[in-house]
Every structure is written in C-alpha cells, then in structure tokens.
Image (spheres, rainbow, N blue to C red):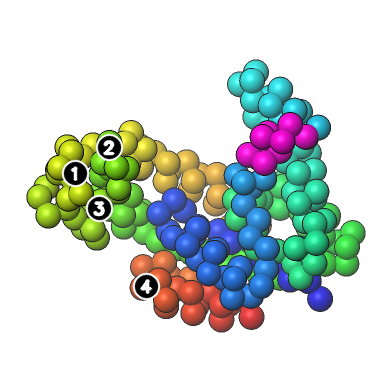
Amino acid sequence: MAKYIVLLGPPGAGKGTQAQIISKTMNLAHISSGDIFRENLKNETELGKLAKGFMNRGELVPDDVTIAMIRDRLKRPDCVQGALLDGFPRTPAQAQALGEMLAEWNAKIDSVPYISVPAQVLIERLSGRWSCPTCGFVYHEVFNAPKQAGVCDKDGAALYQREDDKSETVKRRIDVYVEQTSPLIAFYQEAGVLVEVDGILPIEQVTEELLAAIL
C-alpha cells in the first residue's frame, strides 16, 4: 500500500537534507511544493498560468490551485509507492483537502514527523552564514569558518552576508513559520500522526529517529 508522509520543520532544521535521505532510503518520491510551483510556472501549464495571474497581482495563490498542482504531481508514476511531502500542506485547510484527496484513492497520511529545534539554535545556524561574491562558496562562523575572518579561502574576496542570513531577518522568518505552522502541528497532533524528533541531534541520529517514526 502506498505510504504518504508529511515532513515538517522550521527553516534551519535540516528538513531538506533529511527529506532527500528519507525519500532515497524508503524509495518514495520527494514532493517539494516549491519545485512543483517552479515547474508549473516554467512549463506554462494551465495551473501555472492561473497561479502566475494571482502572483502578478500580488495576491496569494488560492488553495484549490495549489492542491490541483499537488494532485497532478501525486498521480505521476514515481508516486505509485506514495510520497514524502515537503512544504505542503501549510495550513489545516490544506491538510484537510490533502486528506480528502488521498481518501479518494483509499490512502491516508501515515506519519507526520516534525523536526523540532529551539529558535535560538536556528538563529545561530542560519545567521552565521557568509558568502563569497565571486565564487559563491558559503561559509559559517561556527561550522565552517574561513581561515581568515571575512575573507574567502579560495580567492581572497571579502565575504558578505545576504539579507536572508542576517539575524533580524532569520528571527522574523522563524516567527512567521511558528505562527503559520502551529495550527498545522495541532491538526496532525489531534489526528494522532504527529511524531516530534529532536533536530539538535547529529544528522545521522536525526535520520535514524525519523525512519523509526515513519516505518
């Protein structure tokens, strides 16, 4: 029977890394909502054109358009065993629609692992990143510091910090995530499928715990 998993976690929790490992280990298609949007926009599909119209007007793309894109993606041959969903659903309304869609196919969400990391750790992970303007290499003050502070090891260029990586921006991103995702976490908790995993553990250990939660 097909297995459907929704992976949740704030920015900086390592969700992207874990999604790739798990989808490969379990032979499940990794469905990223961002990838689906980009693909529909690039290929100018009917749904892509519809979404673009809303985006051009500065409006949010309605749930039914997003859900139609997800439905279309889940019907492809690589999803016959199920899928690992990443970045969707974002709200209880989307989660409800996803559940109804899967029910049509006699399937359901089997597990919702949530990689939990304290805000302070996320800020440290994300706001310590510095990039080289010429070669594009990314350093980290704590985890991968350059030999000389502020200078690229490879070409000697002065490193800079992207707006996205500044601590005030990072904090805002995390606050928005928590605010938006709390109702979704509560929704899946109530459904009895949410499993919290400690995201501070080393990558391999987080993978082990996630796989134990899913299998």
Residue 6: x %, y % from top left: 64, 61
Distance between the Cα atoms at labels 2 and 1? 8 Å
Residue type beneath disc 3: His
On the image, numbered disc 4 is attached to which residue? 201
What mark, if any, has residue 134 been given in the picture?
Answer: 2
Residue type beneath disc 4: Leu
Residue 129: x %, y % from top left: 28, 47
Q: Does dot 2 land on a helix, a strand or a loop?
A: loop
Q: Does dot 1 land on a helix, a strand or a loop?
A: loop
Q: Residue at x 66, y 34 (%)?
A: 42
Residue type beneath disc 2: Thr
Dot 1 alpha-carbon crowd within 10 angstroms: few under 14, some 14 to 19, many 20 or more: few
Q: Are marks 4 and 2 in contact (CB under 8 Å)?
A: no
What mark, if any, has residue 155 been given in the picture?
Answer: 1
On the image, numbered disc 3 is attached to which residue? 140
Q: Residue at x 17, y 50 (%)?
A: 153
Q: Earlier in the sequence, mark 4 or mark 3?
A: 3
Dot 3 alpha-carbon crowd within 10 angstroms: few under 14, some 14 to 19, many 20 or more: some
Is 30 above or below relative to 181?
Answer: below
Magenta-drawn segment? 37-45
Question: Disc 1 vs disc 3: which is toward the camera?
Answer: 1
Q: What predominant SS class does the magenta segment belong to?
A: helix
Describe residue 210's horizontal placement relative to residue 82 as left or right: left
Dot 2 alpha-carbon crowd within 10 angstroms: few under 14, some 14 to 19, many 20 or more: few
Question: Disc 4 vs disc 2: which is toward the camera?
Answer: 2
Q: Are marks 2 and 1 in contact (CB under 8 Å)?
A: yes
Residue 5: x %, y % from top left: 66, 66
117 and 2: which one is in front? 2
